[in-house]
Amino acid sequence: MNFEEIKENYIKQFKQNDCNYIVLKMEDLMKSILDEGQWNALQLMLHNYNAYRDMHDKPINKYFVVNRNDFPKFKSADEFFKALHNAHDKL
């Protein structure tokens, strides 16, 4: 399997689990970095990510993030958004 296939399989695996994003808690991420090499690797990945988005005219990411552990009754993002939409309609 070549690298492109590995990346595509990884994307498919996440999408099958109703997951389109990787969200990292900043404090935990910073504390998990063990050395300058890992810090430099993170900086390079973020640079490449932002350059890719810029090259494809995608805006800077701005998200509201909900931790699934905080809302265990919802089995999917669709269920959560439906409930949120219904609650909004009742206001």
Image (cartoon, helix red, strand yellow):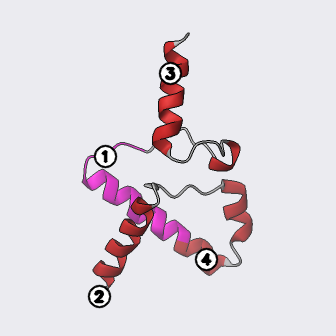
Name the N-terminal-most of marks 4 and 1: 4
Q: Is label 2 in contact with label 4 (beta carbons under 8 Å)?
A: no
Give the CA distance from mark 2 to mark 4: 24 Å
Q: Which residue is mark 4?
A: 38
Foreground mark, 1 or 2, reads 2
Q: The residue under label 3 is which amino acid type?
A: Asn
Looking at the image, residue 66 sits to the left or right of residue 21; the answer is right
Q: Which secondary structure type mostly characterizes the magenta part of the structure?
A: helix
Q: Is label 1 in contact with label 2 (beta carbons under 8 Å)?
A: no
**Residue 87 figure quarter:** top right
**Which residue does the image show at 53% across and 27% down from the upper left?**
84
Q: Indicate whether residue 48 is drawn in magenta.
A: yes
Q: Which residue is mark 2?
A: 2
Residue occupying the far top of the picture: 91
Q: Which residue is mark 1?
A: 58
Foreground mark, 2 or 3, reads 3
| Residue 91 x/y as whole percent | 56, 10
Name the N-terminal-most of marks 2 and 4: 2
**Which residue does the image show at 29% across and 80% down from the upper left?**
5
| Residue 33 x/y as whole percent | 68, 72
Comparing 91 with 48, the one in front is 91
- Look at the image and tell me whether residue 44 can be seen: yes
Give the CA distance from mark 1 to mark 3: 30 Å
Q: The residue under label 1 is which amino acid type?
A: Lys
Q: Is label 4 in contact with label 1 (beta carbons under 8 Å)?
A: no
Instruction: Please provide the residue range marked out in magenta.
Output: 42-60
Q: Dot 1: within a 10 Å radius of its alpha carbon, few (fewer than 14), some, or many (20 or more) residues? A: few
Q: Which residue is mark 3?
A: 86
| Residue 51 x/y as whole percent | 35, 58
Name the N-terminal-most of marks 4 and 3: 4
Residue 72: give its label: none
